[in-house]
Amino acid sequence: MPPVGPRTLAQVYRHFGEVEAAGTSSLYERVAIALSRSDEALRAIEAVPARKRHPTLILAALHDLALAGRAPALAAAYAAADGDAAAGAAIDTLLRMTDAVVAIAVRRRTQTFETGRCAVLYPALAEATRRVGADGVGLIDVGPSAGLNLHVDRVGITYSNGQSLGDPSCPVQLSSSIVGDRSLPTRAMPEVVARVSVDVDPVDVTDAENARWLRACLSPDQPERAASLEAELALVATAPPLLLHGNPLEVLPDAIAGVPSGALPVVITTWALSSFPLESRLRFLHRLDEAASGRAVAWVSAEGVGVAPAIPTLGDRRASGHSIIGLAVFDGSALRAQAIGRCWSRGRLMAWLADS
């Protein structure tokens, strides 16, 4: 967000309430509009660094205080789904606990479990291992996915064309709609022998504060998403990934080297590279190439059109509203990169393009 004064900030919050929250969260619609109309609340939000003033982060910080028992009036309003009471309590909490809201917003970033990602990743990962002929795979997730990407082999996925992948008995059951008439590959993923999360600040979901923050990033009037999140947190907690803290460009070689020999290291990025400048994205590609000097390395990506270097754009326009599912295999001096699909809404809709 660019630097803003009270009036521009008011417009941001009003737009969020009237457009972005409308239809998905009546509570957040009411709270955001109320914040946009309160000069005192807007001045309190201005205590947060400019890049951290977005409604999703401020609302999540307020929700975190409610979940932690530090804002009981707000928690009660949320529990009662009382929009007017929630709006008043949110403003009161923000004014009384400005320092706490600032501290949370500065430390945190909004994070959600986008379960549609696994619907995209499962067939792409299975295709990567098929092309290399691998019997085992080490998954290395770059970015703040909070670990669910690394358990893609354990969830159950149902597609609108009647296909299903993964474990039908898993408590985490996902769905995705297929666009077009091409079926997905039906092969199963091989054994996952390593699960590694690489990020500047990877989320340990077994930590109570981190788990509470993920809950806080959901609006409080979405019980189905909350129930799904609980199942996902429980799944990840049964086999927590190895967390590698640091700049992914620096940590990635160690993550790849740590995958046992005989297994294919597969690096995963899902809407993570857009936060990297172009130079860093090219360095990311170079890191993968370097790591493949002694073994094959694969990269599975779901990124906006033109974001993932070396992945073809299929002639699609940038910022076109969908993303490209990419598969790149680095093997010695050879790089084979292909766009194997398109997806929309973070994987809730997808079209498979590759011949399998």
Image (spheres, rainbow, N blue to C red):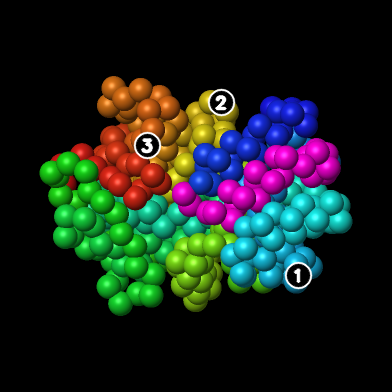
Q: Nearer the viewer, residue 137 or 211?
A: 211
Amino acid on which disc 1 is placed: Pro
Q: Position of residue 72 (x, y in %)?
A: 76, 70
Query: Mark 3 against mark 1, which lies toward the viewer?
Result: 1
On the image, numbered disc 3 is attached to which residue?
Answer: 323
Is residue 67 shown above or below 169? Answer: above
Residue depicted at x 69% and y 61%: 85
Q: Is residue 95 magenta?
A: no
Q: Position of residue 134 (x, y in %)?
A: 28, 57
Q: Position of residue 164 (x, y in %)?
A: 22, 63
Residue 131 is left or right of residue 295, and the answer is left
Q: CA distance from mark 1 to mark 2?
A: 47 Å
Instruction: Bin the neighbour count of mark 2 within 10 Å (Cα to Cα): few under 14, some 14-19, many 20 and up.
Output: few
Amino acid on which disc 3 is placed: Ser
The region drawn magenta spans 23-46
On the image, numbered disc 2 is attached to which residue?
Answer: 279
Which quadrant is the N terminus positioned in? top right
Residue 233 is left or right of residue 162, and the answer is right
Comes first in the chain, label 2 or label 3: 2
Comes first in the chain, label 1 or label 2: 1
Comes first in the chain, label 3 or label 1: 1
Q: Quadrant of residue 307?
A: top left
Query: Mark 2 against mark 3, which lies toward the viewer?
Result: 3
* Residue 230 can be seen, yes or no: yes
- Mark number displayed over residue 72: 1
Element at label 2? helix
Residue 316 is left or right of residue 346, and the answer is left
The prevailing secondary structure element of the residues shown in magenta is helix
Is residue 207 shown above or below 297? Answer: below
Residue depicted at x 40% and y 24%: 318
Instruction: Bin the neighbour count of mark 3 within 10 Å (Cα to Cα): few under 14, some 14-19, many 20 and up.
Output: many
Amino acid on which disc 2 is placed: Glu
